[in-house]
């Protein structure tokens, strides 16, 4: 069938919620455009049929992004970063002012020091956690409060179009190779896989855990399953 379509690739997908009904669809990409499939991988992630949407909280935290690269607005997207840096600078200046007044002989309680110093450290930690992961890992898993509806596993992903970087919303899913009928969604890797976005099965999220490669969209088991009896 693939040869009859001029070498175009075919994809077998589950039809809706019917676990025993499948459809064959033509993949629009050519074989040269499909990322290389790793030998150790057991599943391939695909875009969810349900497009991700931000809640009103998510639109405040992550303005200027959408499900399409053309929705990206760089300066809107970076606005929360500038605001957080300004708050951190103000908190640091207030801490320095308290220390300077104390040196002049005006008494301040230890609670005041702890408040300003703790608030400054908390803001700086929040900036490093969110923006550090986004810039270093090239993707950020959004919290459930940032996503509209009941859908989880939405990430901010960096996508390059015509040599220009865009931040887009993506929700990737895959069929669990162990459960067969369950879906795998993206989730945080903690506590066992720190600083990683992993795929967790909706039926067994603690045991059926897979890696997530944002470039190849491949996944491999992260938890070793016991060998079956009678196998070497």
Image (tube, grey):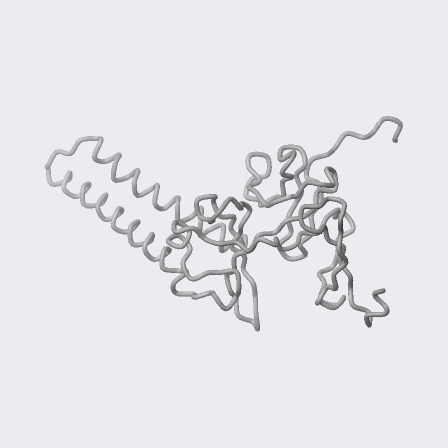
Above/below status of 111 relative to 73: above
Please count the marks in the image: 0
Is residue 6 found left or right of 126 in the rendered image? right
Q: Quadrant of residue 211?
A: top right
Pick whichever, 150 or 83, lies toward us.
150
Place of residue 90 in the rendered image (x, y in percent of width and height, measured from the top left)? 25, 50
Residue reaching furthest to the top: 229
Above/below status of 193 relative to 10: above
Place of residue 63 in the rendered image (x, y in percent of width and height, measured from the top left)? 40, 58
Pick whichever, 37 or 201, lies toward us.
201
Pick whichever, 28 or 33, lies toward us.
28
Q: Quadrant of the C terminus?
A: top right
Above/below status of 64 relative to 112: below
Is residue 26 found left or right of 214 in the rendered image? right
Q: Quadrant of residue 98?
A: top left
Pick whichever, 186 or 78, lies toward us.
186
The residue sitting at 47% across, 44% down in the picture is: 143
Is residue 144 found left or right of 170 in the rendered image? left
Does residue 154 appear anywhere in the picture?
Answer: yes
The residue sitting at 46% across, 49% down in the picture is: 148
Does residue 136 appear anywhere in the picture?
Answer: no
Place of residue 56 in the rendered image (x, y in percent of width and height, measured from the top left)? 39, 51
């Amino acid at each position: 069938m693939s040869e009859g379509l001029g070498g175009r690739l075919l994809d077998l997908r589950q039809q809706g919620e019917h676990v025993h009904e499948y459809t064959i669809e033509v993949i629009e990409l050519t074989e040269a455009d499909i990322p290389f499939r790793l030998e150790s991988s057991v599943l391939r992630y695909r875009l969810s049929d349900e497009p991700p949407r931000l809640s009103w909280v998510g639109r405040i935290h992550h303005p200027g992004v959408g499900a399409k690269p053309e929705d990206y607005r760089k300066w809107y997207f970076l606005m929360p970063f500038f605001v957080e840096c300004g708050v951190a600078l103000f908190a640091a200046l207030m801490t320095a002012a308290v220390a300077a007044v104390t040196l002049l002989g005006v008494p301040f309680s230890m609670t005041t020091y702890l408040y300003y110093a703790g608030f400054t450290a908390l803001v700086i930690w929040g900036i490093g956690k969110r923006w550090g992961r986004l810039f270093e890992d090239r993707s950020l898993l959004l919290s459930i409060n940032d996503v509209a509806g009941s859908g989880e596993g939405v990430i901010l992903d960096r996508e390059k179009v015509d040599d220009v970087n865009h931040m887009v919303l993506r929700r990737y899913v895959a069929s669990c190779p162990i459960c067969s009928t369950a879906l795998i969604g993206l989730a945080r890797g903690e506590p066992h896989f720190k600083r990683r976005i992993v795929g967790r099965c909706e039926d067994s999220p603690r045991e059926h855990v897979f890696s997530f490669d944002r470039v190849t969209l491949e996944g491999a088991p992260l938890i070793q399953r016991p060998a079956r009896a009678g196998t070497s």
